[in-house]
Amino acid sequence: MQHSQKRVARPKLDVERVELPNGLVLLLSENHSIPSVSINAIVRAGSRFEPDENAGLASLVGALLDAGTTTRTSQQIAETIEASGGRLGTFGDYQSSGVVVTLLSKDIALGVDVASDLLMNATFPNEKVHQHSERRVAQIKARLDVPRTQASDAFNEIVFKGSPQHRPPIGYEETVKGLTRADVEAFDHRYYVPDNTMLAIVGDIDKSEVKSKVEATFGKWERAKTFEKFEPPQVPRPHRQTVPIERFIAASKEQVNIIIGHLGIERKNPDYYALLVMDTILGSSPGFTSRIPRILRDEQGLAYTTFSNITSSAGLDPGRFIAYIGTAPENLGRAIAGLRAEIARIVEEPVSEEELETATSYLTGSFVLRFQKNSQVAEFLLEAEVYGLGFDYLEKYPDLIRAITIEDVSRVARAHIDPRNLTTVVVGPIDELGTIGSSTDFSL
């Protein structure tokens, strides 16, 4: 059944895509509403390309990009950006690493120069590598005291077994301690090459002028000497489980943290939009309409925070379907049973016309709010390039969502959600058998 059509905002972008002779992809879009600009650069150099024994390497390299270059010290980099009133950030996560610079549009040349300097000329001083490694080890130890993070990490170890996603991008204490400057430099030389890099510049700019600036700076960047054309290595793919799995982890906390789910989907999956609607109905709406928050939090009072989704982690590799709840230990059995019941219901019963209408109205109505800042638009352009969405995606999105029917939601739920074979991870005041006092009955 096709539900009603409503007028929704349709953001339109004027995007120019340029591929430099060295392979770097440049995406430009003008927005003259405010005199600022965002420069976002990503390199396909995430933790998906690092071996288990070097877990944390890609994240460390990303963090060290602003630790010094052949022309600037770390302090000079910071002072240069701060003097312009701008902001600079570097990162390294699962899929990619990179640099983000935001500043006034009059300083666009400075921003392009600094971004290119960090990507092309980072020197990774030994003392900085040591400092960042020690900081990472402290962060890793701190993660162990956060039950929700513990539960998430344990869930990933099970669901992504055999894939790089099973480990946290930040790495483990023992692997980070073993990383050397030579490891950092080798990773940088292998992956930080122009034909593995995408650059999005959005804001109060003249596209032709910025294009010339980028060609003058990034154009000097030489392709990887060991490759005619850089091709990233193949990544082992995880497989969805075929049996239910339970793991209970003891932690001296007042609350139990529960994650239930299994392997998810890739972003390019054609069922993505129907699953986005399903997510909103089942557990992703921020209001009071999603089933899991409404029933488990608002009606039963089991938690302050509970949600579910399958689309938010979808990327180049399959993400994860999860349902989460944090609750008092005495509610453990009810909380697990409640999550499992709602997961089964979305598969077994059609959603209502009202639920579908509420979900699609929310998704189309809130979509435009995701592109209020230049940095958000720049992130979108990079996402569109990576996943082949097309730069007219913002105009097409409302129709993609409005085309979803009740039958579509049922079909994708049956195809991608398996209520019988779920991984359940619980972290809290519990033993390895799942015992909390006398409350150990998790049956539906």
Image: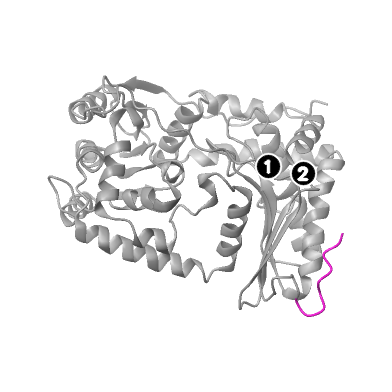
Q: Is residue 212 above or below residue 380?
A: above
Determine crowd level at label 2: few under 14, some 14-19, many 20+ residues with C-alpha closer than 10 A: many
Residue 318, position in %: x, y?
59, 39
* Region of the chain picked out in magenta, as a range: 436-444
- At 70% across and 29% down in the image, what residue appears? 402
- At 77% across and 38% down in the image, what residue appears? 413
Task: Give the residue type at disc 2.
Answer: Asp
Q: Which mark is residue 428?
A: none
Residue 312, position in %: x, y?
59, 44
Residue 84, position in %: x, y?
21, 49
Quadrant including the C terminus: bottom right
Mark 2 and mark 1: span between their CA atoms? Answer: 10 Å
Q: Is 440 colored magenta in this rendering?
A: yes
The residue tagged 1 is: 240
- At 65% across and 52% down in the image, what residue appears? 286
Quadrant including the N terminus: top right
